[in-house]
Structure formats: structure tokens, C-alpha cells
Image (cartoon, rainbow, N blue to C red):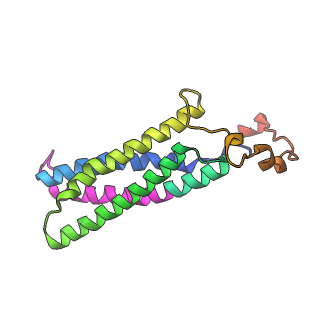
């Protein structure tokens, strides 16, 4: 069956963005010792750890698939894509440092003042910036806003996309028989 491939990157990034505010709320509720609906600090701590580990576990493949899909679909890397790559690397490093600091904090029993700023503000600021560039790229492809796209021929050296895809010109057109698609 001929169909569009699944874009793993597009599906993974949503989880990364969702974990950032969850980790922030969990950190604040744990730090203040709040109990909400019978849920206390031990649960907030577990949710904080789970959010950060989940964000790191998903951010790594999201970055790798973003690079792979980018290189597969386009001939060049416009500034918005380079910014997303840099922000992804920053987010991964920030989360790894936060997890290490949490582990040290738990082992030593002391507080780390910058950790709250990193979890509550840092992660969410980077996630917001990643969202901005992701939406700019996506909405630009849909024609809703201007993109940061630079035409291939304006690159140094120029890239002729027809040379890149010439091997596909000999492939026959793909046809889909809709009578067979429904299973009937």
C-alpha cells in the first residue's frame, strides 16, 4: 500500500513539550511541600523525576529523528532549523544537568538554589523557543506565515534539486486502487 510515511519527529516533540510544564509544577509543589487532593511531596518528587527522565528519554530520539527527517526531505538547513538543533542540544544538556543535580541533592540532603530556576524557567523557556521555531517551520510549509526558507539556488554553492532527485524521475507513477484499500 502506498501512503505517506509516519513522521516520528512530529509525534515525539509533543511529549517533550508536555513534560516541561509538568516537571515545573511538580518541582514547585514538591518544594513548597504542598498536598493537593491527598497527593503530597513524595508523589510530586516522583512526578518530577518521571517528567525529567521522560523528557530526556524522548528528547534524544526527537532530535535524532528531526535531523534524519530534515536531511531526507530538504536540501538545505535554514536558520530556523539550525536554531531548533541548537535549542534541542541545550535542552538535552540542561535536563541531564538537572537530573544529576537532583541525584546529588537527594544523596546529600541539601538544596540547590539554581535547580528551581532551571526546571521551572529554563526548561519551559527552551521548550517555548522550540515550539516557536517548530510552528514557524510547520505553518510556513502550510503557507500561513513566512518561513526562513532560502532557495537552493541562493546557497553557496547553489544546489540544483533536480540533480538531487534525478534518479527518481525514471520511477513509474504510484497508483492506489481505492477498491482494494477498504479491505473489500
> Magenta part mainly helix, strand or loop?
helix
Give the image quarter of residue 131: top left
Give the percent coordinates (x, y) of residue 15: 42, 48
Image mark count: 0
Q: Nearer the viewer, residue 136 or 5?
A: 136
Q: Residue furthest front?
A: 156
Q: Nearer the viewer, residue 169 or 25?
A: 169
Q: Residue at x 53, y 32 (%)?
A: 139
Q: Residue at x 30, y 46 (%)?
A: 21
**Which quarter of the rendering shows the C terminus?**
top right
Seen in the image, is 146 located left or right of residue 74? left
Seen in the image, is 107 located left or right of residue 174? left
Give the image quarter of residue 55: bottom left
Give the percent coordinates (x, y) of residue 181: 73, 39
Q: Is residue 120 magenta?
A: no
Q: Is residue 51 magenta?
A: yes
**Which quarter of the rendering shows the N terminus?**
top right
Seen in the image, is 77 located left or right of residue 96? right
Q: Which residues are magenta?
A: 34-61
Give the percent coordinates (x, y) of residue 148: 56, 37
Whether 97 is drawn above or below 117: the answer is: below
Whether 5 is drawn above or below 97: the answer is: above
Q: Residue furthest top?
A: 144
Give the percent coordinates (x, y) of residue 24: 26, 49
Q: Residue at x 66, y 47 (%)?
A: 73
Amino acid at each position: 500500500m502506498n501512503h505517506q510515511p509516519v513522521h516520528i519527529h512530529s509525534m515525539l516533540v509533543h511529549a517533550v513539550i508536555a513534560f516541561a510544564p509538568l516537571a515545573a509544577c511538580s518541582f514547585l509543589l514538591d518544594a513548597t511541600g504542598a498536598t493537593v487532593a491527598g497527593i503530597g511531596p513524595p508523589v510530586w518528587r516522583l512526578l518530577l523525576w518521571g517528567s525529567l527522565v521522560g523528557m530526556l528519554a524522548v528528547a534524544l530520539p526527537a532530535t535524532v529523528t528531526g535531523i534524519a527527517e530534515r536531511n531526507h526531505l530538504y536540501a538545505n538547513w535554514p536558520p530556523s532549523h539550525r536554531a531548533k538543533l541548537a535549542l534541542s542540544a541545550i535542552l538535552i544538556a540542561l535536563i541531564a544537568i538537572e537530573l544529576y543535580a537532583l541525584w546529588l541533592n537527594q544523596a546529600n540532603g541539601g538544596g540547590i538554589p539554581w535547580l528551581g530556576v532551571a526546571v521551572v524557567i529554563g526548561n519551559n523557556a527552551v521548550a517555548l523557543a522550540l515550539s516557536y521555531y517548530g510552528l514557524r517551520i510547520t505553518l510556513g510549509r502550510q503557507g500561513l506565515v513566512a518561513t526562513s526558507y532560502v532557495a537552493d539556488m541562493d546557497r553557496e554553492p547553489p544546489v540544483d534539486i533536480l540533480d538531487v532527485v534525478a534518479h527518481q524521475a525514471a520511477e513509474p507513477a504510484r497508483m492506489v486502487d481505492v477498491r482494494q484499500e477498504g479491505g473489500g
